[in-house]
Image: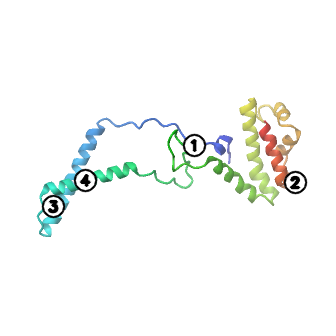
Amino acid sequence: MSTSIDDLLGSGEEPTGRAERPSGGRARGVLRTVLVTAAVVAVILVVLRAVGLRVPIWIIVAGVLAVLAVRRVTTALSPPPPPRAGARVPAGEEPGTWNWSARDALRTAINGWERPLDWCANSRERFTERVLPRLGELADERLRQRHGVTRESDPARARALLGEPLWTFLGTPARRPPSPRDLAAIVAELEKL
């Protein structure tokens, strides 16, 4: 599984333009409202006549239009639906507004590291298989963004930029998972890039 620093820390937010309205949008909306109103009024009239009640048609039309208007307003004011599990969620806030459905990108990134680190705490194989490649990708991304190289594209320069301890750590499987102190030192070296 390949994960870049943008995936780890990105909010997944795409710039969105104003939703394009299909041609004849207003006319289509009015026509739909008229048709729905006519259908609902016809059903209500049939039911009322079947039970023997007589109500003026204008009262039924007004009631149906009122219900449709309330439905339209509540739909426009309702919050967005919760995100699907596993889907990419837009995060962040627009200036001057509070986005109630926003997710904290930092918390997501921390959880993305916390689980694998906890799972690999006592297993060298798991650490080498799961966490070490992520750290390597993170180092490559930092090198690419800051210096225009990766460990693969220019190994000599990448080795000089990373330093011998970090280069060795990323290039050779560890005999044991690093302690939290060692991991903090590794992260500090990555942050210096």
Label located before the other in sequence (1 or 2): 1
Distance in Å between CA atoms under marks 3 and 4: 17 Å
At 71% from the left and 33% from the top, the residue drawn is 145
Label located before the other in sequence (3 or 4): 3
Q: How many C-alpha atoms fall within 10 Å of the one at disc 2: few (<14), some, or many (≥20)?
A: few
Percent x, y of residue 34: 21, 48
Of helix, strand and loop, which one carries label 2?
loop
Label pair 3/4, CB-CB below 8 angstroms: no
At 56% from the left and 44% from the top, the residue drawn is 92
Label located before the other in sequence (1 or 4): 1
Amino acid type, callout 4: Ala
Percent x, y of residue 14: 53, 39
Label located before the other in sequence (2 or 3): 3
Amino acid type, callout 2: Arg
Q: Disc number at residue 66?
A: 4
Distance in Å between CA atoms under marks 1 and 2: 36 Å
Amino acid type, callout 1: Gly
Which quarter of the rendered picture does the C terminus lie within? top right
Percent x, y of residue 160: 85, 33
Q: How many C-alpha atoms fall within 10 Å of the one at disc 4: few (<14), some, or many (≥20)?
A: few
Amino acid type, callout 3: Leu
Q: Disc number at residue 12?
A: 1
- Which residue corresponds to mark 3? 45
In the image shown, does 181 or 47 lie closer to the viewer? 181
Label located before the other in sequence (4 or 2): 4
Distance in Å between CA atoms under marks 2 and 3: 81 Å
